Amino acid sequence: MCEPSDDEFFMLAALKEAAAAAARGEVPIGAVAVLDGKIIAGAGNRVEERKSVTAHAEVELLHLLEEHFQDWRMENVTVYVTKEPCAMCAGALVNARVKRLVYGLPDPRSGCCGSALDITGFSGMLWQVQVTGGVLAEKSGELIRDFFKAARRREK
């Protein structure tokens, strides 16, 4: 079982997935899934590559987990993601019954795990996800800021 002291270790793995996404020209968001203290899957954004609005890191990760478990239920899995999930991804994590979510950078504008909305903790849902936010937030923010700075330079 993961201890909260392990959060930074696993977030560093998610940051590696984010860096790999950036190297592919994707917005640098990465995610890893942990079960019994071990990383069982990792994914990054693939929106541009797949030409799919749903190819966010979290959804890509859930697809890998579905293959791994041959099931959609993730009741013992902790997901680490570098940025607070959007409404689509937060809903997918709830529907997959993820046990715990740990995210890096909060998103006060569109984060749906307690910032702008709280889909993961909404009492009307059939499942609530335990959420810890802000783990290595500065590193996640730096990756995203650098990515968009470079994109703006290319546009000029």
Image (cartoon, rainbow, N blue to C red):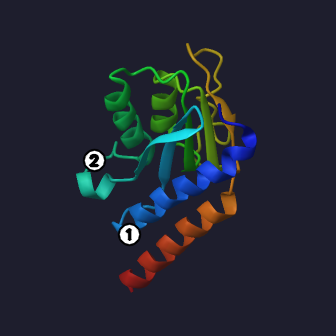
Residue where numbered disc 1 is placed: 23
- Residue at x 37%, y 42% (from the top left corner): 60
Q: Which residue is located at x 26 percent, y 57 percent?
A: 49
Identity of the residue furthest to the right in this view = 5
Rate crowding at label 2 as few (under 14), some (14 to 19) or many (20 or more) other CA atoms within 10 Å. Answer: few
> Hey, what amino acid is under mark 2?
Ser
Left or right of 50, for residue 132: right
Secondary element at tag 2: loop
Between circles 1 and 2, the one closer to the viewer is: 1
Question: Where in the figure is residue 115, as x and y percent of width and height?
Answer: 67, 42
Which residue is found at the position 61% from the left and 21% from the top? 128
Q: Is residue 153 above or below residue 107?
A: below
**Quadrant housing the C terminus:** bottom left
The residue wearing badge 2 is: 52
Q: Are marks 1 and 2 in contact (CB under 8 Å)?
A: no
Res 77 → quadrant: top right
Most foreground residue, 151 or 116 = 151
Inter-mark Cα distance, 1 to 2: 18 Å
User: Would you place residue 137 above or below residue 72 in this image?
Assistant: below
